[in-house]
Amino acid sequence: MRVFEAVPEIQTLGVGINLLPHSVSELWRLDLREPLDATAIRTGALRYHATDGKTIWSEPRGIDAGYPCPQYSIHRGELQQILLNTVLRELGSDAVVTGRRFTHLSQTDKSVSAHFREEGSGGALEAVDGDCLIGADGIMSTVRSGFYPDEGNPVYAGQILWRGVTEAEPFADGRTMVMIGNNALKAVVYPIAARPNGRQLINWIAERAIDKALPQNKGDWNKPGDKADFLEYFTNWHFDWLDMPKLFAGSEGCWEFPMVDRDPVARWSFDRVTLIGDAAHAMRPNGSNGASQAILDAVALADALHDETRIEAALKRYETARLAATAALTLSNRQTGPEVVLQMVHERCPDGFDDIYDHFTEAELTEIADSYKQLAGFTTQQVAAAMRQPDE
């Protein structure tokens, strides 16, 4: 097995990412518990707040919620480095080839050929032959576009995200993730690493509803952002447990992203080729579930390739196991997933609230949280059952 990566040099870049317990259980089975614990935060609670800072709902997460393994919040680049180190250790130093941008493929009933160009030089490279090809090339997947040439750009949700990280004093208990606001204006904040000085690296997301056309230049979808585009909307978000303007101001910069996803498609697997992760099912970040679903894809694909004698049968088995589940999750995330409670509070309590239970029952709030866990496959029962399965 070989991985071909477009960038010439792999660097520890990015901001925060979450790993839910059902994906963590699989990473632990790969003996990654120690490196994850060395850099990540074990998330202990998730809280939803109105724009005045009042608590709507709070629930324990990970070990604190009775799971057999934690939920992690981690720097995306650190997670990628852990996975890269594991691949190089298990598969050899030549398992990852950088500076190779995929252009197209061709296949016969016996093999598939991947064609690349050398990034930066434009030079053509010879095709690389293999038994199968896995397209893990993200929301703008070139592999996917070869099978869906008329699909066009991703679907824009009408919201822009600015993301950054700030070294600051811990808030709450230092292990809490918070979501504040509503569909028009929202912030998501959680710690992703501890610092020796007692401070933490805290990931933040500022989100605004902006009704504009999606930029046609995909290079504008992951670019340095301008805090002036959102800071004025959060001016009054000074809470006794977290000062949002101060947190935003403490970062060196930020990145700007449109909130986008892809429509679910009827199939991912085409003879000896299949799609995985965002290339298969790019979804909105509501529910903090995209990375976890990609990990579950990888497990299902590995199991199918291990058990089936024919590549085509293995890829179809993987598709059958994962396509419908991720399609349902993608559509749920378009309704903001479990974060729908923020908008519900905004609509039911336009003048704020003194006691949330004057407007909601506890059963209603619990159902919103639990139904999403069930759909996404990470109830405590589901994760415990998966962890009891013997290693193959």
Image: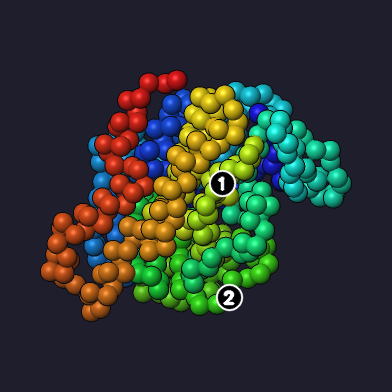
Q: Nearer the viewer, residue 48 or 122?
A: 122
- Which residue is identified by label 1? 268
Q: CA distance from mark 1 to mark 2?
A: 28 Å
Name the quadrant of the N terminus. top right
- Which residue is identified by label 2? 213
Q: Nearer the viewer, residue 297 or 319?
A: 319
Other residues around mark 1 within 10 Å, as few (<14) / some (14–19) / many (≥20): many
Q: Residue at x 25, y 69 (%)?
A: 345
Residue 282 left/right relative to 373 = right
Q: Residue at x 34, y 28 (%)?
A: 387
Where is residue 265? Give x, y as percent: 53, 54
The color scheme shown is rainbow
Kindly tell me whether residue 387 is visible in this rendering. yes
Kindly tell me whether residue 74 is visible in this rendering. no
Which element carries disc 1, helix, strand or loop?
Answer: loop
Which element carries disc 2, helix, strand or loop?
Answer: loop
Q: Earlier in the sequence, mark 1 or mark 2?
A: 2
Q: Residue at x 69, y 26 (%)?
A: 93
Q: Nearer the viewer, residue 141 or 19?
A: 141
Other residues around mark 2 within 10 Å, as few (<14) / some (14–19) / many (≥20): few
- Say what amino acid the circle numbered 1 marks: Trp
- Say what amino acid the circle numbered 2 marks: Ala
Whether label 1 touches label 2, CB < 8 Å: no
